[in-house]
Every structure is written in structure tokens, then in C-alpha cells.
Image (cartoon, rainbow, N blue to C red):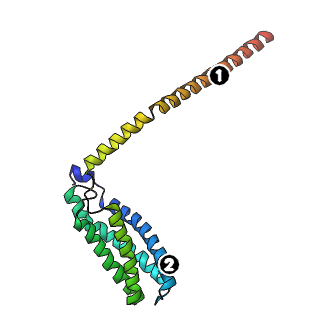
Amino acid sequence: MPGPEQARLPSLAWAITGQLTTGAIKCLIALVLAWICSWWITLDTDFGRIALCLVISSIVSEIVGAIIARPMVLKEGRSNPGGVPFAVLPFTAGLVISFVASYALTGSMHDSLLAASLIAVCNAAEIFWLKLWEKGPTPEEEQARFSEFKAMTKEHFADDVAQIKSRARDKTREKYYRKKARQEAKSNQRNYQSDENS
């Protein structure tokens, strides 16, 4: 059973889901780059096969990357434990996987190098953009930031919330009095008709 600090970390399934989401974005970028490269570089196979290589490579390398990073995440107690191994090991695995998968599908060293290079460029861009070698916040720090943001938001929108609640109360009160007036009018009309009949 996971400890309290592990329970606050995302599960492996959530980590893989997150990796696959960013992998989808990186795969789209790699596909666009491959399409642009196909204007200047003669491919040994058709573009559809290169696209298939990129998609399969992205999916497999993102899953393997999440599995490789999991022990580091649990050891540090952070969703982003930082450090060179956290940045380099999934990158290297993605590079090897993309090359092997591409070579298995195309049988071309040239196209395999292109696919592996495109995956490597996208993964390197992610590493440098997110600064994966730096340690991320602990779950407690993330919770403190969230609580601070929540308090700031509550304070910032307090006047608006009070105004909306006041309007809602006024509308409810108006509806109540209109309904009460209609009921009284119907009751008076019934009483008037019963008086006329008698």
C-alpha cells in the first residue's frame, strides 16, 4: 500500500496518460517536420510509412519513458524529480526505440535516421523547454501554491460573487412575491365567483 506521499503523486497510469498526451503533441510536430523534410530529402519509403513509424515510436517511447521515470518519481516524492538521469534516460530510450521501430518498419537506415532524429529533436525541445533537469515542487509545495491561488482568486472575485448572490436573492424574492400575488389573485377570483354564485 502506498504511503501518504506516494498517494499524492500521480499513479503510473496517470503518468503514462500525461506522457501520451505530450507525446501526441510531439508526434504532430514530428509529422510536420517530416513532411517539410520530405520536400528536400529523398525518402527510401513513402511518407505514410514514415508517419506510421513516428506514431508507433512516439507511443512506445512515451510509455517506456514513463516507466523509466517512475522509480525516480517515487524515490524523490515529486512528479518532476529533476536531475540528469530523469532528463536523459527517457530521451535515450525514445531515441533507441524510434530508430529500432523505424528500421523494423522501413528497412531503410536513411529513413530510420530521419525518424529517430525528428523524435530526438522534439524530445530535446521538451527537455529544454520544461527544464526537466531541475527539481519540481513537492506535493506539499504544489498544494500550498494551489491554496494560495485559491485564496487570491476568492479575494479577487469576492465583490463579483457578492453581487451575483445579491442579484440571485433579489430574483428569487421577486419570483416568490409574483407567485404569491398570482395565488392570491386566483384565490380572490374564486372567492368572488363563489360569492356571485351564492
Mark 2 Cα-neighbour bin, 10 Å: few <14, some 14–19, many ≥20: few
| Residue positioned 26% across, 59% down in the render | 134
Q: Residues within 10 Å of mark 1 (few under 14, many from 20)?
A: few
Residue 187 in percent (x, y) is at 69, 16
Indicate which disc residue 178 carries: 1
Q: Amino acid at mark 1?
A: Arg
Q: Which residue is mark 2?
A: 36
Q: Is residue 69 left or right of residue 179?
A: left
187 over 55 or under it: above or below: above
Q: Residue at x 34, y 73 (%)?
A: 61
Identify the secondary structure beneath mark 2: helix
Give 89 or 37, whichever is nearer the viewer: 37
Assign a secondary structure to mark 1.
helix
Can you give x and y, in whole percent of width and height, for residue 100 in the image? 34, 83
- Which labelled disc corresponds to residue 134? none
Residue 30 appears in which quarter of the rendering?
A: bottom left
Q: Position of residue 161 (x, y in %)?
A: 48, 32
Among the 4 quarters of the image, the one containing residue 114: bottom left
Residue 98 appears in which quarter of the rendering?
Answer: bottom left
Q: Considering only vertical position in the picture, is 100 above or below 91?
A: below
> Compared to 66, does 97 lie above or below?
below
Query: Contact (CB < 8 A) between labels 1 and 2?
Result: no
Question: Where the N terminus falls, by quadrant?
Answer: bottom left
What residue type is disc 2 on? Ile
Residue at horizontal 63 percent and vertical 19 percent from the top:
180
Closer to the chain start, of discs 1 and 2, is: 2
Quadrant where the C terminus is found in the figure = top right
Left or right of residue 87, residue 112 in this image: right
